């Protein structure tokens, strides 16, 4: 199944507590390109980025309070094209199962995901950021059905 990502990307911005300021600083350094996209994010992260950059960022619930699931639902509904998730690899999170589920959905629906500054920089500097892009979503439903029957 093909699914088109438009020229304007719908980008989800998420960061664990120890990485929020890193994502805010990264967003400040990329205000120009981010200002041409549609932005959303989980709770405090969205609020901080909006306050620090002046960018409009639609805020959802905090990750541990269901925000990760909200973003995951948006990905599965085709409402998020791209995700920046600066996660903390050294701290166990009480909502780790939610994080894993969100990353699984991102892979399932074949959206670009950056989990650190280097990858975010590579993605934002890609020529595809300014173009439409056809992503290919595997039909897992039919794959599963074929293996069951």
Image (spheres, grey):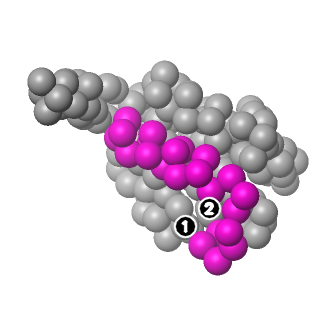
- Label 1 sits on a secondary structure element that is loop
Q: Is residue 37 above or below residue 100?
A: above
Residue under the point 78% across and 63% down? 17
Q: x and y percent of residue 71 in the render?
A: 61, 35
Q: Where does the image place residue 142, in percent across and percent down from the top left?
A: 19, 24
Q: Residue 86 shows which numbered tag?
A: 2
Can residue 2 be seen from the camera position used here?
Answer: no
Residue 24 horizontal/vertical position (percent) = 75, 59
Task: Establish if 1 lies above or below 92.
Answer: above
Q: Which residues are magenta?
A: 88-110
Tell me if residue 24 comes above or below residue 34 in the rendering.
below
77 or 35: nearer the viewer: 77
Whether label 2 touches label 1, CB < 8 Å = yes
Q: Measuring 46% from the left and 64% from the top, which residue is drawn there?
A: 119
Q: Residue at x 83, y 48 (%)?
A: 44
Residue that badge 1 annotates? 116
What is the distance, in whole Å, between disc 2 and disc 1 at their CAs? Answer: 5 Å
Quadrant (top left/top right/bottom left/bottom right) for the N terminus: top left
Does residue 108 belong to the magenta stretch? yes
> In the rendered structure, does residue 143 fall within the stretch colored magenta?
no
Q: Quadrant of the C terminus?
A: top left
- Dot 2 lies on which element? strand
Structural crowding at the residue carrying mark 2, measured as other residues with C-alpha within 10 Å and reported as few (<14), some (14–19) or many (≥20): many
Is residue 22 shown left or right of residue 74? right
Residue placed most toward the observer, 99 or 118 = 99
Residue 117 visible somewhere in the drawing:
yes
Neighbour tally class for label 1: few under 14, some 14-19, many 20 plus, Cα within 10 Å: some
Residue 86 place in picture, x, y as percent: 62, 61
């Amino acid at each position: 199944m093909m699914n088109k990502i438009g020229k304007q990307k719908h980008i989800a911005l998420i960061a664990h507590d120890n990485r929020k300021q890193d994502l805010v600083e990264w967003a400040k350094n990329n205000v120009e390109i981010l200002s041409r996209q549609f932005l959303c994010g989980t709770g405090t992260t969205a609020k901080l980025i909006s306050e620090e950059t002046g960018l409009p960022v639609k805020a959802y619930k905090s990750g541990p309070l269901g925000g990760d699931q909200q973003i995951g639902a948006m990905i599965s509904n085709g409402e998020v094209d791209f995700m920046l998730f600066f996660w903390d690899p050294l701290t166990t999170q009480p909502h780790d199962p939610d994080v894993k589920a969100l990353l699984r959905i991102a892979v399932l629906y074949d959206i670009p995901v950056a989990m650190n500054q280097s990858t975010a920089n590579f993605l934002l500097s890609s020529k595809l950021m300014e173009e439409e892009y056809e992503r290919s979503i595997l039909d897992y439903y039919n794959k599963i059905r074929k293996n069951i029957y």
